[in-house]
Amino acid sequence: MNAFARLSLNQATVQSWSVQEAVDGCARAGIGWIGLWREQVAEQGLHESARLARDAGVRVSSLCRGGFFPAATAAQRRARIDDTARALDEAAALHTDVLVLVCGGLPEGSRDVDGARQMIEDGVAALVPHAAERGVRLAIEPLHPMFAADRSLITTLTLANDVVERVASPHVGVVIDVYHVWWDPAVYAQIARAAPYTLGFHVNDWIVPLPDLLRGRGMMGDGCIDVRRLREAVDRAGYAGPIEVEIFNDVIWSTPGDDVVAHMKDRFVSEVL
């Protein structure tokens, strides 16, 4: 079996590459999947991005991102739901059925955690009909608690699972990123719980000491996460889809993309498989 059959390059790992450069880099390296970001897709052009991936034989594992649902006013909340609906349209045009959701933190000036979490759930539920129409699934990504205030109040896989099960739609699930969940004593039980609706799995590492909260992720094997154990747990739960390498790191971003991809492939074999 091809060791890299499930490997996907998340475009965030090669931040300076355009969609065309990233797709071409995947093709050169024999990587059959790519996770795209909306900003770079917009710069390249939506339909051109879809064409480039198709012509290169590289499939889009996911599109990032929608969400950021909590807001101070009803009009702002509606605008964010509408923007995520457009992201669903974009995902469908790119021939991926997974839209990653970064759900959002507290509205400016608010301390109402419970209220903001309800806004997240309401936003997800409001998008289910559009997701079903487009044939795209909404993948809730729990983020590490350090991002609760500004990026996501869905801070554990338990909370993500709770939302999925209350919304109760086949078009809603979770994406599991090791950077955000490795520390959680409930993670293995919650991976098993998420078996019916796990839509993606992202790998990287937690460097000690962490050089930056957002841009401090490491290449697999450079930190303290037992990536293989988490991958094995996700596999046991029945997930057999792409495994995206998603790394935000200034040093990696300053490294030539082809060198990053080659290093990523080596570590995928030694640390993930």
Image: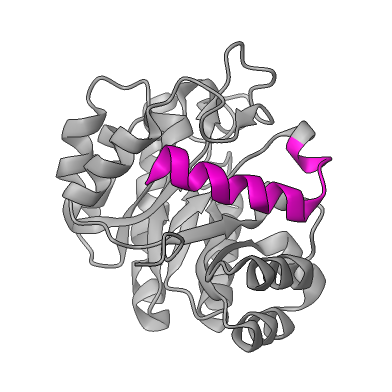
Occupied quadrant, residue 50: bottom right
107 lies above or below 83: above
48 lies above or below 182: below
The percent coordinates of residue 26 (x first, y second) are 64, 67
Magenta: main secondary structure: helix
User: Residue at position x 49%, y 46% from top?
Assistant: 268
Q: Nearer the viewer, residue 98 or 151?
A: 98
Q: Start and end of the magenta stretch? A: 252-273
Q: Nearer the viewer, residue 134 or 112?
A: 134
Q: Residue furthest top?
A: 209
Q: How is the image coloured?
A: one colour
User: Residue at position x 58%, y 20% from top?
Assistant: 207
The percent coordinates of residue 7 (x first, y second) are 48, 59
104 lies above or below 144: below
Asked if residue 269 lies in the magenta stretch, the reply is: yes
Image side of residue 84 versus residue 51, left or right: left
